[in-house]
């Protein structure tokens, strides 16, 4: 699963981008996503989370709803590219269900790279962009340690706007 952090504050002059916090609306987004994840059974057994404050706060809002599991905070997820996200996933291939909570454009680029089939409602929704707090659920025939471009299927793509 690939998730973009929830809505964060705008950058402030002189402040560190890494330390931007979630907005009040971002916290609501994260909670709504946690509820939809739990309802859909999209529960990770391991999380890789960017060390950026907005990602950590997104996970803090999700955890009481989706449950706790091992978490690795990786500052590299803040600045690497989609290939770096893929490598991080592969290094945690023992997980049956892995959530990478990070940033765009990396989440969107990796979701697009892993899924070649562009038919159906989930791929159509992903083609419209990867909004804050969105979640791409990707299934692969091979394990996470063997993920490769075009080696997965986009099973679901949910956004805070899907909450009803």
Image (tube, helix red, strand yellow):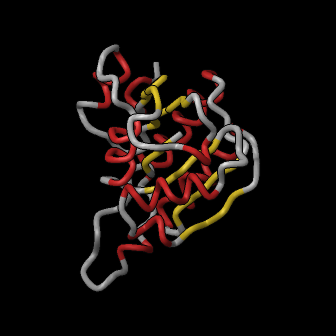
Q: Is residue 64 visible?
A: no
Judged left or right of residue 18, residue 109 is: left
Q: Residue at x 58, y 28 (%)?
A: 141
Q: Is residue 56 above or below residue 160?
A: below
Q: Is residue 23 visible?
A: yes
Residue at the extreme top of the image, as rendered: 120
| Residue 44, position as x, y percentages in the image | 67, 40
In the image, 32 versus 136, the foreground residue is: 136
**How many dots with numbers?**
0
Q: Is residue 6 above or below residue 158?
A: below
| Residue 7, position as x, y percentages in the image | 38, 51
Q: Residue at x 43, y 48 (%)?
A: 4
Q: Toward which corner of the image does residue 17 lie, by quadrant? A: bottom left
Residue at the extreme bottom of the image, as rendered: 14
Judged left or right of residue 120, residue 154 is: right
Q: Residue at x 41, y 38 (%)?
A: 114
Q: Is residue 36 above or below residue 146?
A: above
In the image, 10 versus 74, the foreground residue is: 74
| Residue 164, position as x, y percentages in the image | 46, 18
Q: Toward which corner of the image does residue 67 lie, by quadrant? A: top right
């Amino acid at each position: 699963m690939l998730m973009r952090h929830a809505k964060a504050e705008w950058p402030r002059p002189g402040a560190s981008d890494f330390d931007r916090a979630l907005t009040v609306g971002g916290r609501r987004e994260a909670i709504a996503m946690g509820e939809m994840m739990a309802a859909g059974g999209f529960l990770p057994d391991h999380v890789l989370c960017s060390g950026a404050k907005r990602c950590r706060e997104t996970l803090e809002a999700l955890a009481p709803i989706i449950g706790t599991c091992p978490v690795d905070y990786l500052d590299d997820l803040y600045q690497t590219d989609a290939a770096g996200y893929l490598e991080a996933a592969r290094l945690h291939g023992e997980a049956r269900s892995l959530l990478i909570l990070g940033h765009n454009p990396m989440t969107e680029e990796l979701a697009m790279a892993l899924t070649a089939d562009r038919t159906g409602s989930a791929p159509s929704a992903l083609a419209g962009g990867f909004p804050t707090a969105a979640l791409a659920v990707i299934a692969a025939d091979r394990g996470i340690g063997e993920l490769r471009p075009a080696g997965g299927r986009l099973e679901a793509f949910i956004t805070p706007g899907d909450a009803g």
